[in-house]
Amino acid sequence: MAPGQEAAEATDAKKKVYVIPVREGIFKPALYVVRRGLKEAITEKADVVVLDMETPGGRLDVTFDILKAIEKFPGDTITYVNREATSAGAIIAAGTDQIWLHPKATIGSAEPVSSTGEDINESMQRKILSYLKAKIRAMTEEHRYRSDVIAAMMDPNEELVIDEKVISPKDDLLNLTASEAVETFGDPPVPLLGAGKAESIDQLLDSVLGEGNYTVKRIETSWSEDLAQFITALTPALLAFGLLGLFIEFKTPGFGVFGIGGLILLAIVFFGHHVAGLSGYEPMLLLLLGIVLIGVEVFLLPGTVVFALSGAVLILASLVWAMLDIWPDEPIEFDSDLLLRPLINLSSGVLGAAILCVLLMRFLPSGGPWGGMILQTAIGGEPGRIHALNDSEQKQESGGPTSLVGSKAVAATDLYPSGQVTVNGKRYEARLEFGTVDVGTELVVTEAASFGLVVKKTNSSKEAQS
């Protein structure tokens, strides 16, 4: 066997370990880091995940989300209490297979309090404690003392006595030092809470896996997790303005500030949910495919509808996909828990975009964003009132919109392929049958459609361009 092959096989035989930091408060950014790290560990077939914990605690809802995420990892999970695991940190540690502690670490004081740090009223406190104790018992059945220890950390009314030794008296919340956490009780002797003490994670892994028998990948944190917290909270507003920007752009010739702005806002939504550990890059590819299909409809095959409709469906589907909490190697079950939040965000965004469209049409001159002011400032052309094909003036003067078929027209704006034309001195919304033309090009009306006129180049304009 070649030396290189032997080295590769030796590396493959080593256990893969992922170290995920759980630092500062247990809030949304901590959830994003843990969820992202666990999904990467599952994808890379890691054997062990270590939570490198130093936290004063945090929100219960985030704590439960982290516990649910930990349950999805098929390998071994270890919490390394690096100095402190207080409140929510102690509960999260209880949900892992092993708890190791730095010699100077402490763990405990897990009594539920409100988000402002104040005590919860007695009735609600009883309900929360009852639920938490049941949850801890379900998670810690394999550990003889763990559920009782965590209960004494959460509830001052819990008295913990083992082998006639009072570990935690009544009316007191339990806190343990590293030495107290690894003290053994019972027959056969079992550690009270911790599996052992270690000066570092490397020392911990040497004790558990054997020196040199593992490789370590450390998940890094950055400012992006904090930013993602705000992005995910503002998702409905970002979607509303992003979809509005795309809609305005596709209703006006060319590709400019509205289309770019809309894409940037949607990209921010994708970025925030990717950092939050939800979406990968696949939804972004689906979004781009949807935009391409709408571009085919607008610029190459106007009027076919199927491309625009398919593109719109793909864009909406990509936005929902970006917000789904999908785990590697798990079948996707489209239940209410998975779809509720994404559908609420998307519905709010679409509704917001529709309301903004109505407001623009109501308060901006010349029929809204694709009518007068925005169209003229975006693409140029002489100002003028846009005439609807079915208005009373049109019917009285010319007998209806079909009478315009065959009339000569001049491009009042660039047509890419939509824009405006003038016919007999009046301006109308129009769409080119194929291709694009510049302002001033001579055209002929071929059809009076519901949205406006359909035009094509005249022979003279084709010759001039050739």
Image (cartoon, grey):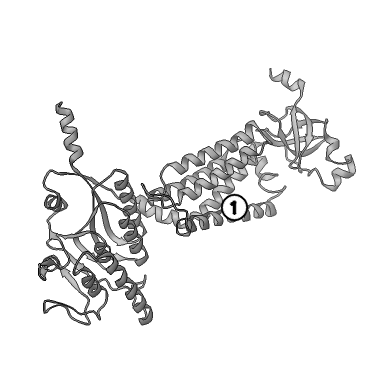
Q: Position of residue 153 (x, y in %)?
A: 23, 73
Q: Residue at x 45, y 56 (%)?
A: 338
Residue position marked by numbered label 1 in the rendering:
353
Q: Position of residue 287 (x, y in %)?
A: 51, 42
Q: Residue at x 38, y 52 (%)?
A: 276
Q: Residues within 10 Å of mark 1 (few under 14, many from 20)?
A: many
Up-down relation of residue 4 to residue 329 (above or below): above
Instruction: Locate the C terminus by quadrant.
Output: top right
- The reply to whether residue 381 is visible in this rendering is no
Q: Residue at x 52, y 43 (%)?
A: 263
In the rendered structure, the answer to whether residue 212 lies left or right of residue 148 reads left
Q: Position of residue 140 (x, y in %)?
A: 25, 65
How many numbered discs sit on the rendered protein? 1
Instruction: Locate the N terminus by quadrant.
Output: top left
Query: Which amino acid type is marked by label 1?
Result: Ala
Q: Residue at x 47, y 42 (%)?
A: 284
- The reply to whether residue 73 is visible in this rendering is yes
Determine which quarter of the picture holds residue 413. Answer: top right
**Residue farthest along the front direction in this orientation:** 188
For this rendering, which residue is in front, 44 or 400? 44
Q: Position of residue 352 (x, y in %)?
A: 58, 56
In the rendered structure, the answer to whether residue 122 lies left or right of residue 214 reads right
Determine which quarter of the picture holds residue 93. Answer: bottom left
What element does badge 1 sit on?
A: helix
